[in-house]
Amino acid sequence: MKAKGKAWKFGADVDTDRIIPARYLNTSDPKELAKYCMEDADDKFAKGVKKGDVIVAGKNFGCGSSREHAPIAIKASGVSCVIAKSFARIFYRNSFNMGLPILECAEAVNGIKKGDVLEVDMGKGEIYNVTKKKRYQANPVPPFMQELVGAGGLMRWIKKRGFVK
Amino acid sequence: MATKTVIKKTAKKATKKVVKKAECKTKAVKKAVESSVRSVRAMTITEKLLAAHAGLKEVTPGQLINAKVDIALGNDITAPIAIREFKKIGAKKVFDRKKVVLVPDHFTPNKDIASATQCKILRDFAKEQKLTHYYDGGDVGVEHALLPEQGVVGPGDLVIGADSHTCTYGALGAFATGVGSTDLAAAMISGEVWFKVPETIKIVFKGKLNKWVSGKDLILHTIGDLGVDGALYKAMEFTGPVIDKLSMDSRLSLCNMAIEAGGKSGIVVPDATTKKYVKGRFERKAVYYTSDKDAEYSEVREYDCSKLEPQVAMPHLPENTVNVSKVGRVNLDQVVIGSCTNGRMEDMAVTAKVLKGKKVAKGTRLIIIPATPEIYNESMKKGYFDTFTKAGAIISPPTCGPCLGGHMGILAAGEVALATTNRNFLGRMGHVKSELYLSNPAVAAASAIKGRIVHPKVIK
Ligand code: SF4
């Protein structure tokens, strides 16, 4: 899986309330959620984001609540991948379970500026900053997570294991 | 401020034959403990719990396991997505109708058509699947106050909840952790969930608690020290002389906020207080696990509580904690006492004690939310409601309400509030330009009387 897009930059500890505020949690419709994605962090994001764009953030991205609406909103907004220094635990799980590619790479986060054009190879964890002509390698995705992604997400994996008759 | 000491990184002790004597007194307990220590490796309570539920003799941090769940929980925000996934994959039946629990507590009583529609998805599913534990109408309360109180979760359980504060149940000696909706969907079908066995941080509270200091202050202080990602991916085990004396309500508040340090779970090894609490309440058989004395911890932190004051978390992160006397002048538009952190009986009692015969300051709104119907009724019977209404407080039905900025007390731009809830993220209780402080209920009640953040000792 490869993607190309512009970088949107955010700081550390971006919580799920900023990714998708609770006032919009009375629905779980991805398109509806995408309209308000990142609203409390950058109110220009939802309107400006283009298909393939990349969210680049500091440590502990997605901390706070377990709402899967957060990765759903990000994915539905067209974002191809989130690169952060680290991810909060539940957000990390959720992203793999529902198929939002995420990469951990502190070096890339430090080197990428807002608006830089990026090429990301999600499978290999390669990040290329087209604007700055710099290449980064993200932390490898653990084998089990690769298996989940390979199966097409957690639900398909469960089905594969014979739980759905 | 209490002294913060980072004691040591525990030296790695490789696998070792350990057979421990049961320390607990009752026979049943002894049996449970003995059955849990047939391991070859010294383990923490968390490791033992996970090993037992994965059908393994032992587990090591970092290991990936598939574990059986005792309870899988969802609410009106997370369950609709889980139910959608459940149906999409073609599943027909939940793995066990007694073990899938649905609590539509966030927007209850439904604030608008959209949230009513979400709740209806839960209601229909609960009916279709004949779920034993579905709470609606006058039975509904804030999930993490409701489940321990109703005996749905208990010692030795492995609980997953599509809600980050599921970690609350660690107070009972359970392994409980928050997951997402897809995880919930998968668990509803398979009765299993995948985990990476976490490392454990041991947190030891020493000394004696001062007046007006509670479980909430212990955890706020800990988060202040560790930071909001200080325990990322890790289990937090709370122990020490202060914990030995701590009430169950305070332990529930303490474990509730493990997630605010990034923790996967928080846990207290069961003791006499636990047994007393679950007696006649827990609907299944309790299994009491302990930590082996030479179990490995990734880190041990000790806090001396004898100088600990009530804590206040300043906007906009729970890690911004200071002693209440150091807050400075903060005028308040609103005070909220409630939530899965501090909406329990002990919290209602201390609120009533502070408010007795007093009035809420002009210009400040005080909203009190007993977390469950039982707490609501008990507070009424004890005469607390009389104290609350005479003071000029608003009493809300059990709900999450304003805690997540849902309804029942949302802040306008520029407004400042103090709440006994667990998160003060930007915009959490309303407008992004509002400000939220966190504290225990005694501080909140006293501050409502004064209209600004104060130490409860100033209320004479
Ligand atoms: S009271 Fe607040 S933190 Fe607790 S479950 Fe409800 S919304 Fe979440």
Image: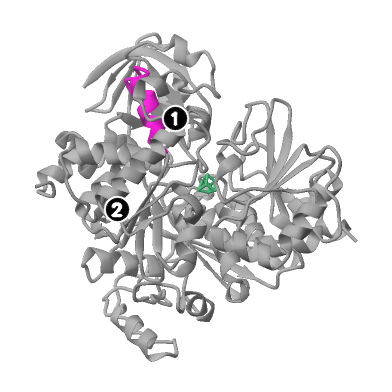
Camera-side residue of B324 and B450: B450
Question: Residue B306: which numbered mark, if any?
Answer: none
Camera-side residue of A160 and B77: B77
In percent of the image, x 66 and y 43: which residue is there? B320
Query: Residue A46's x, y, as percent?
Result: 45, 15
Task: Tell me the subunit letter for badge 2.
Answer: B
Magenta stretch containing residue A21, yes or no?
no
Classed neighbour count for the residue bearing mark 2: other residues with Cα under 10 Å, few (<14), some (14–19), many (≥20): some
In percent of the image, x 72 and y 49: which residue is there? B322
Query: Residue A21's x, y, as percent?
Result: 51, 30
User: In the rendered view, would you say B424 is above or below A121?
Assistant: below
Quarter of the rendering occupied by the N terminus of chain B: bottom right
Magenta-highlighted residues: A67-82
Residue B50 as seen in the image, left or right of residue B382: left
Magenta stretch containing residue A69, yes or no?
yes
Does the image show residue B378?
yes
Classed neighbour count for the residue bearing mark 1: other residues with Cα under 10 Å, few (<14), some (14–19), many (≥20): some
Task: Tell me the subunit letter for badge 1.
Answer: B
User: In the rendered view, would you say A133 is above or below A18?
Assistant: above
Amino acid type of the residue tagged 2 in the rendering: Phe
- Queried on whether the Cβ of the residue with tag 2 lies below 8 angstroms from ligand 1, the answer reads no
Q: Quadrant of residue A104?
A: top left
Query: Residue B189's x, y, as percent?
Result: 21, 50
In percent of the image, x 23 and y 55: which residue is there? B192
Residue A48 as seen in the image, left or right of residue B340: left
Q: Quadrant of residue B424?
A: top right
Q: Nearer the viewer, mark 2 or mark 1?
A: 1
Amino acid type of the residue tagged 1 in the rendering: Ala
Does the image show residue B267?
no
Query: Residue A129's x, y, as percent?
Result: 36, 15
Question: Residue B114: which numbered mark, if any?
Answer: 1
- Residue that numbered label 2 is attached to: B195
